[in-house]
């Protein structure tokens, strides 16, 4: 085997030889027992070399000039569906001015590859990785959008739905036709007793709408593993041909000009009897190998883990400085903690989660966010927030109980705690009471102050509310997450830019956060957040940076005015309002947030 590794390492130069050698060792540990492994490894090496040779000169130049572009403190992200925001890919290209007006430099486009016909889980059931959704345009439009965006220093990050494919993808069709090679692309189980043995340790992703992890297929004559919906067939990464095919997809998209990948459902890639088949060590090997191969072909292209789990399960997705995996991961615990704090009127949940998230390794960075296209999962807050507190927070965010301001909805109950749907504005009670606007600004003010890149979810910048229209659309009515997938309201957005109403104030607040973040030395990547617990229960107090260059963030999570302790020099500047102040204390109005700097 050593011989095979040496043979395939030949021809590498400099660091690339080392990257390949490490990848080859990890591949051997995953697939070394497979007959024909040496030939397979050399075919993978050829794939990687060909991709490296095929990389366009302008993209190679971008790799060199944009190493670690994703860590710049000036980055602001925006996450959206192509159709809901710009109609088509060229429509998004036409809207870059709007995004740049907000300071956006990182544009996450939700799934845009050709989806399954009919229901497709919002595009997360991909029928063809080599083509885009024809409703959005064609591959030329896709490449043109990325080129235009990159020329304006906006970097497009796309979903790589790597765990599963649609049941009408060519590999699935071929498997159904009886092709042995493609049958082996999936986890097929012949009898119900074996299904039960697997299920004994598995969890359900959609316990209400798609219970169980297997779907019977008459054509296959077997149960096929489907962690998500029955039409999303999990790929079998224990088969090296699956790994190679998906690596080819990754490198091919990178060479089209993608600046980064959101690796969807990263934790699910490897299955092992007797375990939950989530976040297994083999998953981490696959990610470390992908990082290494991508570093050979397209080093500035970033990998982001979609691992929505407890913090101790998420942190390993960063890997280590010696064996990096994903460069970015969602700070989903902080996000859910912020909502819990808002609902409970106590800073404790978010304080505890922020403190724990500071453990991220130095080579990696967080993606901070308030909302996304999915539900808010509270169960990931354990052990920081007790289950009854999770349930209480969820109840308040759906408007249950006296004074409850939220207008969210329950999606499903997961590990004893409900998960919630709803746009940030509706969950904050924007039109429910006079404090809704302050709640939304508080959450985004925190998101922008944290260590990592803030990502705005489309429409939040203008306080777009829940979209009820999905209920009367038969294709979407069965999926509650469409509540937070509205079409952009361009009249409202244009009004916001013209300075009218609460939308304008929210938009202006986000721009202000972005502006300060990009310029203040305290927001540099090296300054992770320090939590100051010496405050009353409702107050979150954080520091970034040290000494005269440091800032203090103070936020009141309650609906009453509270006194907060200022830990800066005697006089300070409120960076958000530009008002000076002094003293060791200040009063925070309900849901107020302040970014203070010493003067
Ligand atoms: C991720 C996506 C979610 C989708 C699931 C299956 O969690 O964010 O929307 O349903 O993966 O692809």
Image: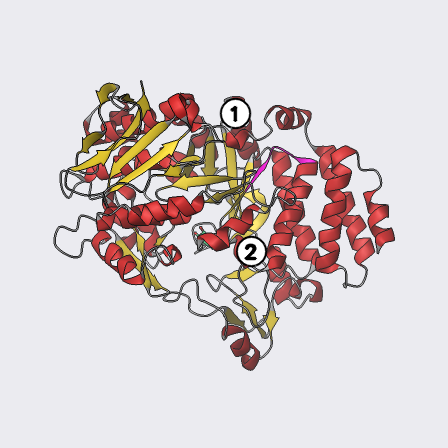
Does ligand 1 reach within 8 Å of label 2's beta carbon? yes
Which numbered disc covers residue 244?
none
Q: Residue 304, how many percent across, how many down? A: 52, 43
Does 229 sit left or right of 463 as displayed?
right
Magenta span: 297-303
- Quick one: SS at disc 1? helix
In contact (CB < 8 Å): disc 1 and disc 2: no
The residue drawn where x is 42% and y is 38% is 79
The residue drawn where x is 68% and y is 42% is 293
- Can residue 162 be seen here? yes
- Quick one: SS at disc 2? loop
Quarter that holds the C terminus: top left
Does 223 sit left or right of 508 as displayed?
right
Does 453 sit left or right of 139 as displayed?
left
- Can residue 422 be seen here? no
Q: Residue 577, how many percent across, how many down? A: 24, 22
Determine which residue is flagged by label 1. 148
Quarter that holds the N terminus: bottom right
Which numbered disc covers residue 163?
2
Q: Residue 553, how many percent across, how many down? A: 31, 32
Q: Is residue 505 magenta?
A: no
Inter-mark Cα distance, 1 to 2: 30 Å
* Along the viewing direction, whichever of 211 and 590 lies nearer the viewer: 590
């Amino acid at each position: 085997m050593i011989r095979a590794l040496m043979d395939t390492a030949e021809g590498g130069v400099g660091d690339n030889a080392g990257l390949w050698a490490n990848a080859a060792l990890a591949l051997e540990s995953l697939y070394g027992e497979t007959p024909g492994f040496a030939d397979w490894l050399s075919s993978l090496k050829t794939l990687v070399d060909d991709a490296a040779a095929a990389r366009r000169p302008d993209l190679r130049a971008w790799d060199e000039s944009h190493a670690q572009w994703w860590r710049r403190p000036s980055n602001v992200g925006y996450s959206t569906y192509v159709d809901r925001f710009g109609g088509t890919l060229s429509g998004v290209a036409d809207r870059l001015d709007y995004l740049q007006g907000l300071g956006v430099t990182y544009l996450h486009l939700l799934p845009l590859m050709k989806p399954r016909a009919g229901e497709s889980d919002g595009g997360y059931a991909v029928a063809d990785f080599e083509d885009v959704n024809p409703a959005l345009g064609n591959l030329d439009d896709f490449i043109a959008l990325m080129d235009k965006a990159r020329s304006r220093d906006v970097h497009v990050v796309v979903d790589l739905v790597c765990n599963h494919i649609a049941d009408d993808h060519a590999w699935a069709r071929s498997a159904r036709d009886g092709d042995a090679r493609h049958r082996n692309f999936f986890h097929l189980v012949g009898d119900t007793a074996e299904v039960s043995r697997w299920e004994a340790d598995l969890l359900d992703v959609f316990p209400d709408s798609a219970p169980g992890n297997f779907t019977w297929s008459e054509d296959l004559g077997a149960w096929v593993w489907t962690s998500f919906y029955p039409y999303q067939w999990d790929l079998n990464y224990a088969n090296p041909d699956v790994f190679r095919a998906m690596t080819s997809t990754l490198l091919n998209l990178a060479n089209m000009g993608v600046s980064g990948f959101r690796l969807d459902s990263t934790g699910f890639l490897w299955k092992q009897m007797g375990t939950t088949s989530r976040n297994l060590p083999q998953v981490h090997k696959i990610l470390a190998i992908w990082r290494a191969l991508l570093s050979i072909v397209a080093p500035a292209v970033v990998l982001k883990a979609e691992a929505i789990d407890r913090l101790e399960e998420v942190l390993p997705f960063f890997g280590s400085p010696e064996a990096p995996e994903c460069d970015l991961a969602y700070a989903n615990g902080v996000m859910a903690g912020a909502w819990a704090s808002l609902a409970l009127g106590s800073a404790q949940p978010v304080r505890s989660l922020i403190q724990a998230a500071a453990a991220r390794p130095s080579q990696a960075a967080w993606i901070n966010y308030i909302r996304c296209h999915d539900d808010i999962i509270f169960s990931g807050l354990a052990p920081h927030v007790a289950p009854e507190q999770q349930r209480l927070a969820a109840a308040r965010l759906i408007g249950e109980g006296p004074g409850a301001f939220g207008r969210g909805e329950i999606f499903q109950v997961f590990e004893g705690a409900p998960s919630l749907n709803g746009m940030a504005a509706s969950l904050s009670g924007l039109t429910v009471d006079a404090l809704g606007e302050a709640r939304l600004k508080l959450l985004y003010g925190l998101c922008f102050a944290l260590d990592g890149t803030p990502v705005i979810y489309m429409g939040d910048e203008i306080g777009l509310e829940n979209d009820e229209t999905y209920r009367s659309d038969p294709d979407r009515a069965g999926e509650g997450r469409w509540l937070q997938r509205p079409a952009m309201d361009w009249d409202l957005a244009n009004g916001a830019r013209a300075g009218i109403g609460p939308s304008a104030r929210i938009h202006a607040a986000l721009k202000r956060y972005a502006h300060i973040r990009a310029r203040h030395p305290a927001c540099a990547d090296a300054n992770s957040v320090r939590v100051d617990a010496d405050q009353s229960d409702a107050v979150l107090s954080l520091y970034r940076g040290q000494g005269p260059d440091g800032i203090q963030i103070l936020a009141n999570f309650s609906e009453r005015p509270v006194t907060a302790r200022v830990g800066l020099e005697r006089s300070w500047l409120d960076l958000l309002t530009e008002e000076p102040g002094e003293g060791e204390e200040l009063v925070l109005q309900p849901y107020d947030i302040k970014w203070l700097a010493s003067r």
